[in-house]
Image (cartoon, coloured by chain):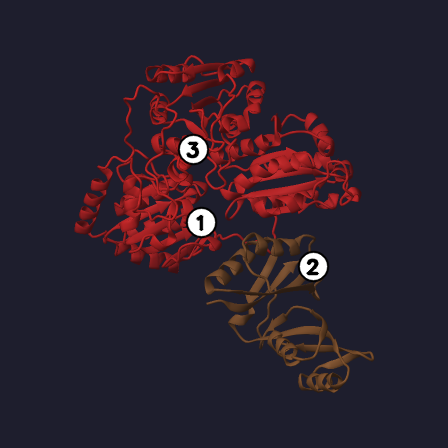
Chain colours: A red, B brown
Amino acid sequence: MELTGAEIVVRSLIEEGVEHLFGYPGGAVLHIYDALYKQEELQHVLVRHEQAATHAADGYARSTGKPGVVLVTSGPGATNAVTGIATAYMDSIPMVVLTGQVPLGLIGNDAFQEVDSVGITRPVVKHNFLVEDINNLAATIKKAFYVATTGRPGPVVVDIPKDITAQKAEFAYPRDIKIRSYNPVIKTQPGQTKKAYELIMQAKKPMIYTGGGVILSNASDELIKFAQLLGAPVTNTLMGLGAYPANDKQFVGMLGMHGTYEANMGMHNSDVLIAIGARFDDRVTGNLEKFCPDARIVHVDIDPASISKNVKVDVAIVGDVKEVVSELNGLIEASDQRLDNAAMTSWWQQIEEWRAQDCLKYNANTGTIKPQFVIEQLHEVTKGDAFVTSDVGQHQMFAAQYYGFNKPRRWINSGGLGTMGFGLPAAMGVQLAHPGEQVACVTGEGSIQMCIQELSTCTQYNLPVKIINLNNGYLGMVRQWQEFFYEKRYASSYMTSLPDFVALAESYGHVGIRIDKPEDVKQALEDAFGKYKDRVVFLDFMIDREENVYPMIPAGAGLNEMILI
Amino acid sequence: MKQKHIISLLLENESGALSRVSGLFSARAYNIESLSVAPTDDETMSRMTIVTTGTDEIVEQILKQLNKLVDVVKLVDLTESEHIERELMLAKVEATGDARDEVKRLVDIFHGRVVDVTDTTYTVELTDTCDKLDAFLTSLSSIKIYEVVRSGAIGITGGENILAC
């Protein structure tokens, strides 16, 4: 059947099972938009800024495990999308971004709305393509989905010149695709797994440290079984929260710069560290010279380049986390041997002593609204079962520390790139994928203004997300660093001339509530998720202005050198 | 300890493939001493040779990161085993007075050729390992060098080992 390039694009997406396409039209993609107009299988979601299209697709992907799909025009459409592409890249999120391009003959001529999209996005994509022949269009889209979703996932850009979308070609969507130069890891390494098993069984002070890889690999059940077979403590990275239930007694909380005392001390004092789907990020390790001085390290990761990148490991297993952890579980179950009982008892005793420090305690009786309190109440009102997106800063850390995620894919945040403006559009993507579920965007008055235009998209598509704005009138994390390390010189971290968020929300047709007193926090949340559950609700919490995030590991310090409150 | 490594790659012969490789080196602050690339007998593939220096850890990362690039078909660190390394150099040097004979003598010693002659200059062609080319330039000492053009090293595995897809 002969179709136009534009029709081929749309049909290919449908063949891939895409249901929602986040985008914004423009000259170079008009043929594609016309093809979208003529069909009903694929829903296009019109955002208000291309950055939001990528974040919404990202939230969709993180909450479902399916690739997020974006369509933007050439030039500024593509450059606006770059922040969202880089955000997905840093957190290994599967995403396919279609960018319009000027006609082939004009490429390189500084044509209207021309940029070298392939060149600009190259450092922040897993791979990208420029389609130069309509006969390769369908196969290229197939390749894009294949690369984006296999191995260590990531965003893939397909740049499509306008003239190609107007030409005609025979359409047959390829069933399978092979790329000779791309062979994602599919086999495990049983020999290495055996070695890891032997090392693990010698542990007297084991620590299981897991990251976003466990979530990407859908390996939560395997991880829970593994941890319980060993009886070892588990800590999650910021990206890994929810992979292990926060309400389980073996969970010692998040680790790293704002991790718990018990998690970081447990890491520092462990003798065998089992790293699973985590990449030893600098926010996790602190000073590398001081990192886990006594530990022998096992590292499971699908990306060979993550192995021994920052920290030299003793046993590396390259493979899909789900498969490898299953193999480890099989080895443990096949034997009667368990970890040394006496050693484990004394290790847990030590951990419980650290836990008794209660490092997340805060002074709730100041008469002001504490951000930690808001998050705790959010947990209570949503029964710990909401999808929570966040922006970047103090509110992000408070949400990570105090919400208590018990399921994977519920905590949606930009961990790697740290992109302010991520939270609201990501929440839209989550809500679209999960109609009827509770979706909260925890944000601050700084971050929310970076993509606040999306309140309009929420209206158009009836996406009843709840915005939890922790408003302290400061760029809180910047202010905190300035307080600690710059003698309180608050350079440009004071947010002045703020809008009336209640009136702003109402102007878009949403519900706006301002909360000034601690005693009103719970009621406001109950209203938001109760009587206003079908509406977008903007909850503007006027919180304690100078609350800090604790514990904190200052730059250059080791995991055992935390600042506690 | 930093050491020199010669990495040989088979690359998809596609537009942009070269910039993926060079972009990786600049983005991750790896060092490139030289890079040479040309199509092979199989027109769908290019062969690239990169000379870099780094500690064992850095070179291990370079190899892994290169392997991750979708356009890289195969690669090998030639310095890990027996290999043949060659670089081509063209140098235009002073050839007046005593220098005229001295240059000719040195060119003979280094098995090079004088490929262009004027009253005042010789243009010398030399093909050898990078170290030998360096040694030749050092040996010119007092003789004025006007221009040096080097191809960057290319290399191939020794013996029967073959880098192919």
Residue A442 visible in the shown view? no
Asked if A452 appears above or below A276 in the picture, the reply is: above
Chain of the residue under the numbered disc 1 shown in the image: A
Q: Do the residues at pointers 3 and 1 share their chain?
A: yes
Residue at disc 1, secondary structure: loop
Query: Marks 2 and 3, Cα distance to the nearest angstrom?
Result: 55 Å
Question: Dot 1 corresponds to which residue?
Answer: A320
The image quarter containing residue A461 is: top right
Front-lying residue, B71 or A392: A392
Q: Residue at x 53, y 26 (%)?
A: A449
Q: What amino acid does circle 2 point to?
A: Thr
Residue A432 point in image, percent of width and height: 52, 26
Query: Marks 3 and 1, Cα distance to the nearest angstrom?
Result: 40 Å
**CB atoms at circles 1 and 2 under 8 Å apart?**
no
Residue A231 point in image, percent of width and height: 25, 45
Check disc 3: other Cα within 10 Å, few if <14, some if 14-19, many if 20+: many
Residue A70 visible in the shown view? yes
Question: Dot 2 corresponds to which residue?
Answer: B44
Question: Is residue A193 toward the left or the right of residue A357 in the image?
Answer: right
Question: Dot 3 corresponds to which residue?
Answer: A479
Front-lying residue, A313 or A549: A549
Residue B5 point in image, percent of width and height: 54, 68
Q: Which mark is residue A229?
A: none
Q: What amino acid does circle 3 point to?
A: Arg
Chain of the residue under the numbered disc 3 shown in the image: A
Residue at disc 3, secondary structure: helix
